[in-house]
Image (cartoon, helix red, strand yellow):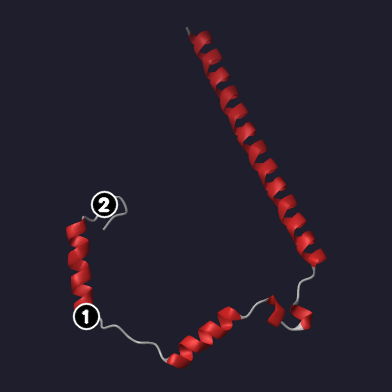
Amino acid sequence: MGWDKRINEHDILKMEDYLSTLMSPVRPREEFVQGLRHGLGQSESHLPENEKISLLEKILWGMAGFASAIVLLTIGIRAIVRLVRQSNLRERKRKKGASLVV
């Protein structure tokens, strides 16, 4: 199947029915679920002292992220402006060359 080809709803339902006959639902072990809940329930307060992030570090990382976003935007805008200018120069040269030929 190519990326440009769409699958209609009927085919999706047929595929779902076919897969449901091949697979059966599995109930996870209770220990596994409890382990996941415990891991997800831990917050920053449960981290060891050396892994806690101070307010100053958060501010510095935020400023670094903001500065890098500004730099990337500036570079992107400069690249777009340069491409537009180059295409305008090419058009002018093409028109100038065409007017000399005529």
Looking at the rendered structure, the kind of residue marked 2 is: Lys
Numbered disc 2: secondary structure: loop
Percent position of residue 20, x then y: 22, 76
The residue singled out by tag 1 in the image is 22
> Which residue does the image show at 57% across and 19% down from the upper left?
93
Q: Earlier in the sequence, mark 1 or mark 2?
A: 2
The residue singled out by tag 2 in the image is 5
Query: What's the distance in space between the residues labelled 1 and 2, CA to CA?
Result: 26 Å
Percent position of residue 49, x then y: 78, 82
Task: Decide if residue 21 is on the left or right side of residue 53.
Answer: left
Percent position of residue 60, x then y: 79, 60
> Which residue does the image show at 22% across and 62% down from the upper left?
12
Callouts 1 and 2 close, C-beta under 8 Å: no
Res. 43 mark: none
Looking at the rendered structure, the kind of residue marked 1 is: Leu
Along the line of sight, which residue is nearer the eye, 70 or 97? 70
Q: Quadrant of the N terminus?
A: bottom left
Task: Decide if residue 64 is on the left or right side of residue 24.
Answer: right
Q: Residue furthest top?
A: 102
When the figure is inspected, residue 19 is found, relative to residue 69, above or below; the finding is: below
Query: Quarter-wise, where is residue 96 in the image?
Result: top right
> Which residue does the image show at 77% across and 55% down from the upper left?
63
When the figure is inspected, residue 17 is found, relative to residue 37, above or below; the finding is: above
Numbered disc 1: secondary structure: helix
Query: Quarter-wise, where is residue 42 in the image?
Result: bottom right
Percent position of residue 33, x then y: 47, 86
- Of circles 1 and 2, the one toward us is 1
